[in-house]
Amino acid sequence: MREALVSLSAITRNVETLRAATGNVASMAIVKANGYGHGAVPAARAALAGGADWLGVADIDEALELRTAGIDAPLLAWLHDPHRDFSAAVAAKIDLGVSHLGELDRAAAASGNTFVQIKVDTGLGRHGADPREWAEIFDAAAAHQKAGRLIVRGLWSHLANASAASDAAQVEQFALALNAARAAGLSPEITHLAATAGALRVPAARFGLVRLGVGIYGLSPFDDEDSAGLGLIPAMELRATIVATKRVAAGTGVSYGHDYRAERETTLALVPIGYADGLPRQASGTGKVSIAGENFPVVGRIAMDQIVIDIGDAPVEAGAVAILFGDPANGVPAATDWANAADTINYDIVTGIGPRVQRRYRS
Ligand SMILES: Cc1ncc(COP(=O)(O)O)c(C=O)c1O
């Protein structure tokens, strides 16, 4: 057994908690990248049950997957191949995030009731119309709207989270973009800038809606505050059944390269999950795993399909369940612990859990 056990009620509760913490402003649950590894469709349903008003994904194909599953909630997709035909998305009532004039014109060319949300770059330096392009894209959007080719439903941007000063500057830029859009004759009913971090710590960035990603999965976007501090419950528990144990003598080398040698006679437990399943290889020798209520170190190099745990003299046998990470309130390692061990972020850990790991759901 190699599974990610996902608590859907945790996702629902996290949305409720985040909504309350953000003054019940409208929210968009971000379920891209297979719901941050949790399963897009179940995560979307759980988030909607918690009161999310919108769903957001990067790709149109991710959005269509939700529609195919019968989810008819308002839905935004914003990252498009330059040759992507928008007709299927429009037919499926998917709002199109548009970041430049070419995308806007292609959206206008799609037949049907086309809703767009114009993305502006307010300082992230990634996607979205640059301030020098605002007048042109807003004027073009107003012309398309007047001609009945599309409706501009939203205006939005994304924070860089570089510093409090940069967040404040982006809030100001966003207000300028909104003014410019209005001056061009647009009246976007939905305005959004903040993701989880901004929604919680930059009230001025909330505007009319917040986009909630990592927080709905119970993970903290902050270095200085953990899930529990935010009142969030990590939704994913990564588990695997120990396939073998082995008593070894002091000095025994473990795994490729023998980076680790047993300091004394000990028992090694083999857990069938490795870097092909998303465990970061960089956490070799530093990650921890919970077995029978105790945390033990991963020793030696993390391999493609398996890791070795030094369980000392613990009376653990094959068939016992090893918990790689879950809710630290239960005494198990957190996804964030693995992120720290691998010098990355918790987002990277949960989104990286591979397809060989079966997703199982509990309420
Ligand atoms: C445009 C956009 N909005 C919102 C989010 C959600 O961010 P978070 O998971 O930090 O809440 C992301 C995630 O990367 C994003 O790319």
Image (cartoon, rainbow, N blue to C red):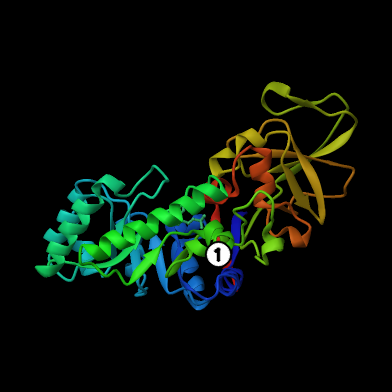
- Camera-side residue of 173 and 264: 173
- The residue type indicated by label 1 comes to Ile
* Front in this rendered view, residue 181 or 26: 181
Asked which quadrant contains residue 98, the reply is bottom left
Is the distance from the Cβ of mark 1 to the nearest ligand 1 atom less than 8 Å? yes
The picture quadrant where one finds residue 58 is bottom left
- Quadrant of the image for the N terminus? bottom right
Q: Which residue is farthest left?
A: 147
Q: Residue at x 29, y 49 (%)?
A: 129
From this view, report whether residue 178 is shown above or below residue 277.
below
Residue at image point 17% right, 67% down: 150
Element type where label 1 sits in the image: helix
In this rendering, the count of numbered labels is: 1
User: Is residue 116 visible to the viewer in this orientation of the structure?
Assistant: no
Residue 176, image x and y in percent? Answer: 35, 57
**Residue 80 in picture, x, y percent from top left:** 28, 50
Tell me the residue that label 1 is attached to: 216
Quarter holding residue 30 = bottom left
Whole-percent x, y for residue 298 in the image: 74, 39
> Residue at point 53% right, 44% down?
162
Label 1 packing within 10 angstroms: few (<14), some (14-19), many (20+): many
Is 16 placed left or right of 293 in the picture? left
Residue 345 visible in image? yes
